[in-house]
Image (tube, helix red, strand yellow):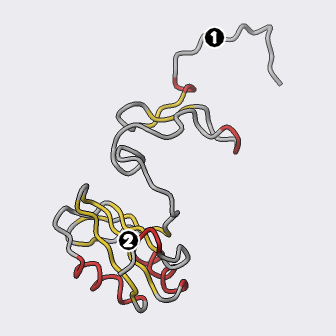
Amino acid sequence: MSRHREWDLKCKVYVGNLGNNTARGDLEASFSKYGALKNVWVARNPPGFAFVEYEDPRDAEDAVRAMDGSRICGSRVRVEMSSGRARERNGPRGGGGGGDRGGDRSRGGPRGGADFRGRIFSFDLLPHYPIPPAIVFG
């Protein structure tokens, strides 16, 4: 069996937020409904995520649409096409820091981000001083 890093990205599905006791067979039973599986790999250290590889990329896309937000072994899972990039241990899915904290200004997003607990905040919510009536912004 090949390592999950060598799998075809068009057929590779990331499954996150898995419970610690989720077994390979649980994933095979849930994901085989959408097409022929080529490989299934479940992380054990640290636990909580897995990769599923399909024979056909269309089956992978169908599984992502159908399974994202569903429950496997009691946990609501995140299912998406794999990006092929390694994540930091305490990155976006690990609960903790990391990532861009300044908001997405390039796409017109609000200025703000996430504090160290992952909660969203905005600079727009900070106390504002009143604008004198003689100053008008247009």
Q: In the visual, does 107 lie left or right of 38?
A: right
> Which residue type carries mark 1?
Pro
Along the viewing direction, whichever of 63 and 47 lies nearer the viewer: 47
Q: Is residue 116 above or below residue 31?
A: above
Q: For the residue carrying disc 2, how many other residues have a C-alpha within 10 Å: few (<14), some (14-19), or many (20+)? A: many
Along the viewing direction, whichever of 95 and 120 lies nearer the viewer: 95
Query: If you read the primary sequence from the N terminus, does the residue marked by circle 1 or circle 2 appear first?
Result: 2
Image coordinates of residue 108 in percent, x first then y, are 70, 41
Q: Residue furthest front?
A: 2
Task: Find disc 1 in the rendering and name its residue.
Answer: 130
Q: Is residue 127 above or below residue 82?
A: above
Which residue sits at x=44%, y=80%?
63
> Which residue type carries mark 2?
Phe
Q: Secondary structure at mark 1?
A: loop
Q: In the visual, does 41 lie left or right of 125?
A: left
Task: Find disc 2 in the rendering and name its residue.
Answer: 51
Q: In the visual, does 22 lie left or right of 100?
A: left
Q: Is residue 108 above or below residue 13?
A: above
Along the viewing direction, whichever of 109 and 10 lies nearer the viewer: 10
Q: Check the picture and name the quadrant holding the C terminus.
A: top right
Give the mark toward the camera: 1 or 2.
2
Which residue sits at x=25%, y=64%?
75
Which residue sits at x=44%, y=73%?
13
Q: Secondary structure at mark 2?
A: strand
Image coordinates of residue 7 in percent, x first then y, are 47, 75
